[in-house]
Amino acid sequence: MSTMRLSRCVLVLLLLSSSPVKAAESLMIYSAQKEPYIRPLLDRYTAETGVEFEFLNDQGPVLIERLAAEGADTRADVLITVDAGNLWTAAERGLLAPIDSDVLEANVPAALRDTGGRWFGLSRRARTIVYASERVAPAELDGYGGLADAKWKGRLCLRTSRNVYNQSLVATRIAHLGEAEAERLVRGWVANLALTPLPDDTLTVKAIAAGECDVGVVNMYYLARLKREDANLPVAVHWADQGGRGVHVNVCGAGVSAHSRQKAAAQRFLEWLSSASVQREIARLNLEYPVNAEAAADPLLAAWGEFTADALPLTEAGRLQPDAVRLMDRAGWR
Ligand code: FE
C-alpha cells in the first residue's frame, strides 16, 4: 500500500517536472493611465508574445485601496499609476514586489525608479509653468517661486490640491525649501488665484487661452495634447527654475503586484515597456518624455527644447506627501 502510494507520488512528480514551464497566457493590469494610452502597447505585446491582457482602469488611490483589500486573492499582476506619489504609497503598503532586473536598471534612470526595485518610471512628465503667449512675456516669469509675487494677483490658475500632481510638487518644494518657506510660497500662490482651483490641468490651459488667467502650472502633456489639436492655441510653456533646481518631473510608472502568481511574466512585460522602440511609442501616444535615453521624444515636444530637470529622487515626493497635503490645507488651497 505504502509502496503503491509512493510510486503514484513519483509518477505525479515525473509528470509535473516533464511538463514545460507554462507561459503566462493572460496578465491582469490595474491602470490609472487611461486605456487609449495603453491599449496599443498591450495589443503589440500580444502580437509579439501571445500574452493576452485584462485591463482595469481607475484612479490610482482607488486601485491601491482595491489591491490592499484583495490582498493575496488579487488577480492583479501589474499596477500602472501616474505620479510617483501613488507608486510610493503602493510600495510602502507592501502591495508591490521587489524586482531585480538588469534590463530595467539599465533602461530607467535611478532617480525615476524605486531604490528597492518595487516600481519603475515608464514615461516622464514635467509639471511646469504655462502662460498666455499674447499677454505675458517670458522674461516676466521667474520659476515656481515667482508665481507667488504680487504682480500675478488675480492672474494665476491652479488645479485642486486634492490632485496628486500638486501634492508631489509641493512635497518637493518642502524637500528643497523646508516646511516654513514652502508654506510661504504656497500661500503666495493661493493669494494670486484668479479662479477657484480647477478640477484638471486641461481646464487650466483652456482658462488661460480664454483669458480667465494668465499663468498656470500643469503637466506639460496636457498642453501638448491641446497643441496637437490646435497649433495656434495662445498658450506657451516655460521651463521653471532653470537657474535653480530645475523643473519638477514625475513619472507614469509600474510595478509588479506583490501577490501576482505570474511575477516573472509581469517582469518581462515591464522590461519590454522600457525598451527603446516601445518607449518611442509610449511617448508618441501620451506625449510625455521617454525614460529610456535611447528613445527620442515626440517632435512636438522636441520643438519645446531641452530643460534641466530637478534631480531630487522621486521617492522624496512620496515620503513628504502627507506633509504636503497638510500644508496645502493650512494655506487654504482647496
Ligand atoms: Fe495626467
Image (cartoon, rainbow, N blue to C red):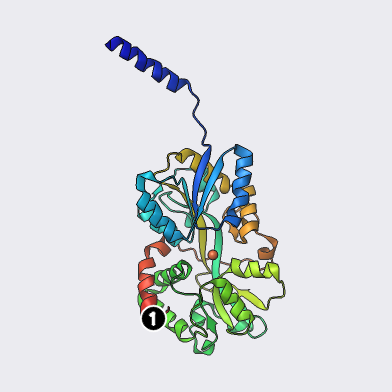
Label 1, secondary structure: give it.
loop
Dot 1 alpha-carbon crowd within 10 angstroms: few under 14, some 14 to 19, many 20 or more: some
Is any atom of residue 123 visible in this view? yes
Q: What residue type is labelled 1?
A: Ala
Q: Is residue 193 left or right of residue 221?
A: left
Q: Which residue is drawn at 54% across and 75% down?
A: 217
Can you give x and y, in whole percent of width and height, for residue 47 in the image? 64, 40
| Image quarter in which the C terminus is found | bottom left
Residue lying at the far front of the rendered structure: 1
| Image quarter in which the N terminus is found | top left
| 192 over 84 or under it: above or below | below
Is any atom of residue 94 visible in this view? no
Can you give x and y, in whole percent of width and height, for residue 90 in the image? 40, 55
Q: Residue at x 43, y 47 (%)?
A: 257
| 57 over 148 or under it: above or below | above
Q: Which of 248 and 231 is in front in this view?
A: 231
| 241 over 298 or under it: above or below | below
Can you give x and y, in whole percent of width and height, for residue 331 in the image? 39, 81
Query: Is label 1's Cβ within 8 Å of ligand 1?
Result: no
Identify the residue under disc 1. 331
Q: Nearer the viewer, residue 142 or 201?
A: 201
Q: Which residue is drawn at 49% across and 46% down?
A: 28
Q: How many marks?
A: 1
- Quadrant assignment, res 297: bottom right
Can you give x and y, in whole percent of width and height, for residue 254 in the image? 49, 52
| 300 over 45 or under it: above or below | below
Q: In which quarter of the image is ligand 1?
A: bottom right
